[in-house]
Amino acid sequence: MSLAPLARIPKAELHLHIEGTLEPELAFALARRNGVTLPYADTDALREAYLFADLQSFLNLYYGLMAVLLTEDDFEALADAYLARAAEQGVRHAEIFFDPQAHMARGVPMGTVVTGLSRALARSEERHGVSTKLIMCFLRDQSAESAMETLEAAKPYLEHIVGVGLDSAEVGNPAAPFREVYEAAAALGLRKVAHAGEEGDPSYVWEALDVLGVERVDHGLRSLEDPELVARLVRDRIPLTLCPLSNVRLRAIDVLEEHPLVKMMDAGLLCTVNSDDPAYFGGYAGDTFHAVHEALALDHERVRELARNSFVASFLDGSAQDEALRARYLAEVEAYPLDDITG
Ligand code: HPA
Ligand code: ZN
């Protein structure tokens, strides 16, 4: 089914794990190519396993399926498939996470991952009309020493990487041990984001801000529980990269109708909506816009505000060239004819 015009409004995707775009069909194709045996009979059986109780139950499957990603060509194919789908969904700019530790632990070197992804990203503007940036995430359920070694391993590839993030199992894995690695990343000129407040309480968001010094919070879903935190996020114009379909699938909320997005926007928070791990959570960026428009009865101005916010919150501010690109995208958002369309 093709996507409604409203959902294809020009937008940036700021919270997207490239490994979370691995569709079952590509997973099985890569498994065949690489001689990897998956513990599922076929793509239907794999899809049937996509019933998650929480973040950890998803992560178990997500890390397991990465076994099929071995070569530069595999990472290139993964990223190219995502960018083609993103383009169909109105994505004009994508800031893409990857999890190098999950690959290095399987014997796949940093260079294989970054070179493969970068090959797809380098052609993306020409082939798909989507500009891109790459953000390297540290796994918060691994040690800070491992994160520091990962940063070291990334040094030959920093021309391809705009920033660092922090993901994986949140509760019980506070950000504080990662202070030094974030300081080292900043000293290398890297931008800083971190997952916080997805399952964790507002203290995790405070720590991302005060200990890591992040300039954007990934999720931040539980921020409304702490009015002082809201005041801080509003004062400093810290963007939140919310992922509503992910929140439903990982049971952070019961149903999309209960998502606090509108309350968060009303509180003055700079909200964006994103797809997180779209192969697993039932929708890409445009599908996500469509779903929140329907479930939360967003009017056209709210939809336009979300699209505008996505470019405002992006890292398209590092150079005159990036600023010009952002200005062009923002003009596309304002010119997009929402009032003539329904759905
Ligand atoms: N949360 C934390 N870590 C992740 C996620 C997520 O939603 N997706 C992939 N790694
Ligand atoms: Zn995420």
Image (spheres, rainbow, N blue to C red):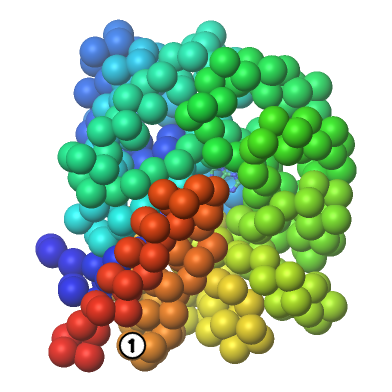
Q: Position of residue 175 (x, y in %)?
A: 81, 44
Q: Is residue 29 left or right of residue 168?
A: left
* Quarter of the view holding residue 289: bottom left
Q: Position of residue 308 (x, y in %)?
A: 43, 73
The residue nearer to you, when weighing 334 against 164, is 334
Q: Which residue lies at the image location 75% right of the left edge and 23% below the top edge?
A: 148
Q: Is residue 113 above or below residue 319?
A: above
Q: Which residue lies at the image location 69% right of the left edge and 30% below the top edge?
A: 188
Q: Determine crowd level at label 1: few under 14, some 14-19, many 20+ residues with C-alpha closer than 10 A.
A: some
Q: Quadrant of the N terminus?
A: bottom left
The residue nearer to you, when weighing 249 against 265, is 265
**Element on which disc 1 rests:** helix
Residue ID for mark 1: 300
Q: Quadrant of the C terminus?
A: bottom left
Q: Amino acid at mark 1?
A: His
Does the image show residue 177? yes
Q: Which residue lies at the image location 24% right of the left edge and 68% below the top edge?
A: 8
The residue nearer to you, when weighing 210 against 318, is 318
Q: Is residue 244 above or below residue 116?
A: below
Q: Is residue 299 above or below residue 115?
A: below
Q: How many marks?
A: 1
Does the image show residue 38? no
